Amino acid sequence: SEFVTLFGGELVMIKLKMSIEDISEYQTGILPKNAVKIETPQSIEEMMKKAAPIAAVLCVLMFVTMLCKTVMNKTVVISHVFILIGFCLGYICLVIHEWLHGIVYPRNALVTIGKITGKISFVALASYPLKRRRFIVMCLLPFVLGIIPLLIFIVSPAEYRELNGLMFGMSCMGMVSPFPDVYNVFIVLKK
């Protein structure tokens, strides 16, 4: 299915594909002469390995947040069942994560969002050059799916264990899942 998204006054064509066999077929655009192509790992697996230290740092950040809230309140602040429900909701939100990547592209860009066949990975694919700043925004925008539930978790009362568990689970998925995107930002910032 296809849909058009209006974002920042620009129309972006976003195509939803349930199964994507080969991501390289979506990355075939011609770059302008002044564009700089970033060199990224050739496969999703290689990208995940190279970006793994970023995921580790984000996991530690989440653990420290949970530890601080628990120590400050001197009680268990989460429901373990609701953390699992939050993880599941966070996984479902991966489609929204990819849509957030897609809405940053300029007018007339075609963005394909889908699940890679045989993997649990979702992707947003486009062959469209972006300016450096816009590329960084495109990479980091999905963090809102982690930041919003994390802030709710931080400010909600300790006795709201179900809400805390739900928000913590969602924030873990929302904060850690963009780790390959953060890796791409580091690559761009090094250029």
Image: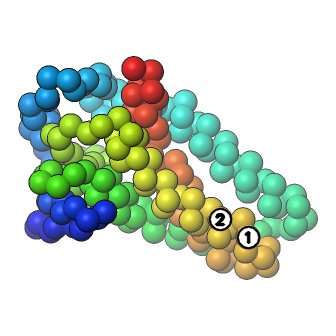
Q: CA distance from mark 2 to mark 1?
A: 6 Å
Quadrant (top left/top right/bottom left/bottom right) for the N terminus:
bottom left
Dividing the picture into quarters, in which one does residue 12 lie? bottom left
Q: Residue at x 82, y 61 (%)?
A: 70
Disc ID at residue 151: 2
According to the picture, the residue beneath numbered tag 1 turns out to be 155
Quadrant (top left/top right/bottom left/bottom right) for the C terminus:
top left
Q: Position of residue 90 (x, y in %)?
A: 46, 63
Within-10-Å neighbours for mark 2: few <14, some 14–19, many 20+: few
Where disc 2 sits, the SS reads helix
* Residue 165 in view in this figure: no
Residues at discs 2 and 1 in contact (Cβ within 8 Å): yes
Relative placement, left or right, of 29 versus 11 is: left
Q: Position of residue 128 (x, y in %)?
A: 17, 41
* Residue 128 in view in this figure: yes
Rendered position, 116 above or below 47: below
Please state which of residues 135 and 46 is positioned toward the viewer in this rendering.
135
Relative placement, left or right, of 191 versus 52 is: left
Q: Position of residue 179 (x, y in %)?
A: 47, 41
Q: Amino acid at mark 2?
A: Leu
Relative placement, left or right, of 171 versus 177 is: right
Rendered position, 90 above or below 185: below
